[in-house]
Each structure stands twice: as structure tokens, then as C-alpha cells.
Amino acid sequence: MNQAPAISLVVQAKRKAENGVDYSPRHGARCPWCSRKTATYCTRPWEGPARIRFHRCTNSACVLSSMGVSIKSLEADQND
């Protein structure tokens, strides 16, 4: 059985979590693996028109959650 495609998908999701997903003030941030809403554990101050937050997936069945991967989100100020 070839596991390379599954491993590739996990690597891509982990990379997306590290690089940053979109953050919506209305909907929060979604896990790049399971698409569930995440829990915020750190919110950085605004730096110009952008703010960075860090999240964890709360879905116990999620691969990223079981690996303890931190998910970075980026919020852009729409008023600028």
C-alpha cells in the first residue's frame, strides 16, 4: 500500500497551518485539515493593517490536532 499521497496531504496541511490561514472576525479561523473552527490561544497586537493569531484545532479526530500543530491566522483590517 502506497502511503505517499496521504503523507503529502498531511505535509501540505501542516505547511498551510504554519504559513497562515485566513481569519474572519465573524467566522474565526478554520483548520486546514478538517475545516472545523479552531480555538485561539494567542492574539498578537495589530501591526499596521494586519494581526496574527495562533490557534489549535479542537477536533480530537483531526490529524493536525493529534500532532499538536499550531495554526497561524492572518487578519487584515478592511478599513484601510
Image (cartoon, rainbow, N blue to C red):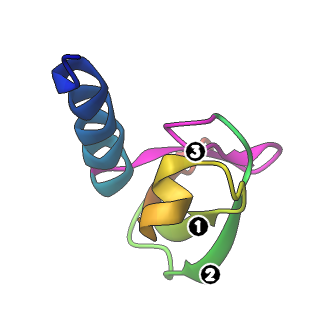
Say which residue appears at 23% left-offset and 40% top-offset. 11
| Residue wearing tag 2 | 41
Amino acid at the residue labelled 1: Arg
Q: Is residue 5 above or below residue 37?
A: above
Q: Point out the tag, 1 or 2, that comes first from the N-terminus.
A: 2
Point out the image quarter for the N terminus. top left
Q: Secondary structure at mark 3?
A: loop
Say which residue appears at 60% left-offset and 41% top-offset. 78
Q: Is residue 51 above or below residue 16?
A: below
- Which range is magenta? 19-34
Amino acid at the residue labelled 3: Cys
Q: Give how far apart the Cα atoms at labels 1 and 2 are.
A: 7 Å
Residue 18 x/y as whole percent: 30, 56
Q: Secondary structure at mark 2?
A: strand
Nearest to the observer: residue 65 or residue 51: 65
Q: Give how far apart the Cα atoms at labels 3 and 2 are.
A: 14 Å
Drawn side of residue 58 relative to residue 72, left or right: right
Residue at the far front in the pictured view = 1
CB-based contact (under 8 Å), mark 1 and mark 2: yes
Drawn side of residue 57 relative to residue 18, left or right: right
| Residue wearing tag 3 | 31
| Residue wearing tag 1 | 56
Residue 60 x/y as whole percent: 70, 59
Q: Is residue 65 above or below residue 80?
A: below
